[in-house]
Amino acid sequence: MSPPLAPLPATDPASRLSAQRRDPTIIPAGSRSPAHRSPNPGRQQPGRKEVPPGKCGQPSAKFSRRAQTCSTRRRSHCPAELAKVALSRLPLRPPGRQLAEAKLSAPRSGARSPTSRRKEARDLQHLRNGAGARRRQPLLPRPPEPLPREGEAAEEKVGLVPQPPGERPAPRVKYSSLVALAFIIRPTAVIPWIPLLFRHFWQAQRKLDLILHQFLPVGFVTLSWSLIIDRIFFGEWTLVQYNFLKFNVLQNLGTFYGSHPWHWYFSQGFPAVLGTHLPFFIHGCFLAPKRYRILLVTVLWTLLVYSMLSHKEFRFIYPVLPFCMVFCGYSLNHLKMWKKPALSVLFLSNMLLALYTGLVHQRGTLDVMTHIQELGYNNNLNKSAASVFVMMPCHSTPFYSHVHHPLPMRFLQCPPDLTGKSQYLDEADVFYQNPLSWLYKEFHNNSTLPTYLIIFNVLEEEISAFLISRNYERTATFFHTHLPEGRTGSHIYIYERKLKGKLYRR
C-alpha cells in the first residue's frame, strides 16, 4: 500500500497561521528560516527595516509570525490592554472615576522621577478609596458645647444630608428649608452657610428657577412665620434678626463682656477647640479629595468673619467642628502603621478631658443650686420669708431653670450699657470695688437681709465683718475647681442667717 499523501499547504493567511501553530517547522512564504533570523530579535539590524507591530489581537498576513499578532510580552506592555485589565479589576464605580483610574494605571513612556511616581500612586489610591472614605471615617468625640451651639451644629449637619459636597445641585426644597430654619433659630447660622449656598447657586444649571422657585418662596414663608411668632410674643411687630445684627455688629455692644485681638481664633481659639484633633485636621486637609475643599473654605470663612468682631468666645466656632471632623477622618483613614495608636491617643485624650470637665471642673455652681432646690422643697422651711442672694460674678450659676421652685432669688446684675454713657459700671463691678461697703449700704435694714448668701471662698475674708454682725453662719461647702482665677474661687460657701436663735434647717 502506498503511503498517504501529504496535505496540501494552506493558501489563505488564516489557514497558514493555524497550520503553523500546529507545526512550528512550517515557515510562511516570504519569511526567513530560523537559521537566518537575527540572534537578537529585539534589536534592529543594520540595513534592515523594522517590522511594524500589528494591532492587538489582529493577525497580519504580510509579516512573519512574530509580527502577525502581539506576542505575550508585547501584549503585557500594551497601554490599551493594561487599561482594559485595570478597568476589569475595578469595582463598580462611576464612569468618570473608572477612566481616571485607568489613565493612572496605564504605563507612560519616558523617564519619570520618584516623586512623580509616588504622586501618581497616591492619586490612584485616593481615587480607589474616595468612594468609601466618608463611610469608613471614625466617629470621634467632641468637646461639650452649649445647647444653642449644639443645635446650630446639628442643623448644619442635617442640612448637608440632602445636598452633600461633590454632587451637582438639585432643586430640593428640603435643603433650603433647613438652612432657613437654622437662620431663624439663630441668625449666626447663616455665616457658615454662605459659602455652601454660593456653591449651590454657582453649580445650578437653572439659576433663575433656583431663585424664583426655591430661595424666595422658602425665605418668604420662613420669615413670615418668624414675624408672626415674634408679634405674638412681644406684642408688636419686630424683626429679631435685625435687632441681633444691630446689637452685636452695628453697635458692637458685645465688647462690654470682653474683647480679643483679631487673630485670637487662629492663634488660640481654633487650636484650643480642636485640641488633639489639630494635627489630624491639618494632615487631612492635604489628603481629602477636591470635592471637600468647600468644607475647608467654610471653616476658614467662618473663622475670618468672627475675627472681625471684637468679642470672641470658644463657643462661637463650635458649629465648624463637624466639617473639621471630615478632614480628621480622612487623615486617620490613610494612616497605616500608626492608625491604632492615633485612635487610642484621640480616644483617651478626649475621654479623660470630657470626664474631668463634665464631672469635676467647675461643678460647684450646679451642686449649690441643687442644694438650694432641696432647701426649697423642704417642708420645715418657712418659704414665705426665705430668700437667696448669689454674690458671685455674672452668669456663674443657673437660675429658676435649675431650681424649679418659686423661691425669691437675686444675683448681681451686669447688663450692657444701651445709653452710651462713659465710665459705665454695672452692679457687679460696683460690688467688687468695695464689697463690704456695698453690703452695709444695700442692707442697712435687717428686714431686707436674705436668708441665704452664696459666695466664693475668695470673698469670705473681705466680708467677714458683715457676716458676723448680721448673724450669718456657714452651713454648706461645695468644691468648684482646681484652677481658681480672679473672682472665682476653688470652693463655694453657703451662709445661712440666724433668726431668733435658730437656723433655717431641714
Image (spheres, rainbow, N blue to C red):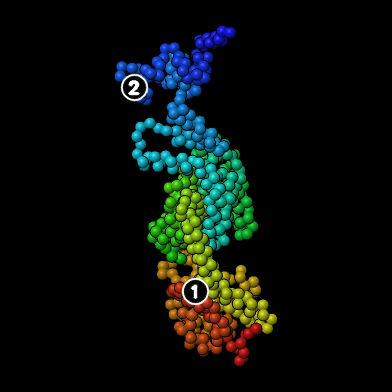
497 left or right of 77?
A: right
Dot 1, how many residues are within 10 Å of its Cα: few (below 14), some (14-19), or many (20+)?
some
Q: CA distance from mark 1 to mark 2?
A: 86 Å
Instruction: Residue 192: tell me if it is visible.
Output: no
Work out whether mark 1 precedes mark 2 in sequence or the reverse, and give the earlier one: 2
**Which residue is outermost to the top?**
2
Where is 277 relative to 112, above or below?
below
For label 2, the crowd category at 10 Å Cα-Cα, with few meaning under 14, some 14 to 19 and many 20 or more, is few
> Viewer-nearest of labels 1 and 2?
2
Q: Looking at the image, do the residues carrying marks 1 and 2 touch, with CB atoms under 8 Å apart?
A: no
Q: Residue furthest left?
A: 46
Viewer-proximal residue among 435 and 305: 305
Residue 45 pos. (x, y %):
32, 20
Quadrant showing the C terminus: bottom right
Q: Residue shown at 35%/17% (left/top)?
A: 49
Q: Is residue 61 visible?
A: yes
* Residue under the image location 60 percent in, 47 percent down: 177
Amino acid at circle 2: Gln
Name the residue carrying label 1: 481
Q: Report x, y in % for residue 59.
A: 48, 19
| Nearer to the camera, 427 or 320 | 320
Q: Position of residue 494 (x, y in %)?
A: 55, 81
Q: Dot 2 corresponds to which residue?
A: 44
Q: Which mark is residue 221?
A: none
Identify which residue is drawn at 52% across, 59% down: 142
Most extreme residue toward the bottom is: 501
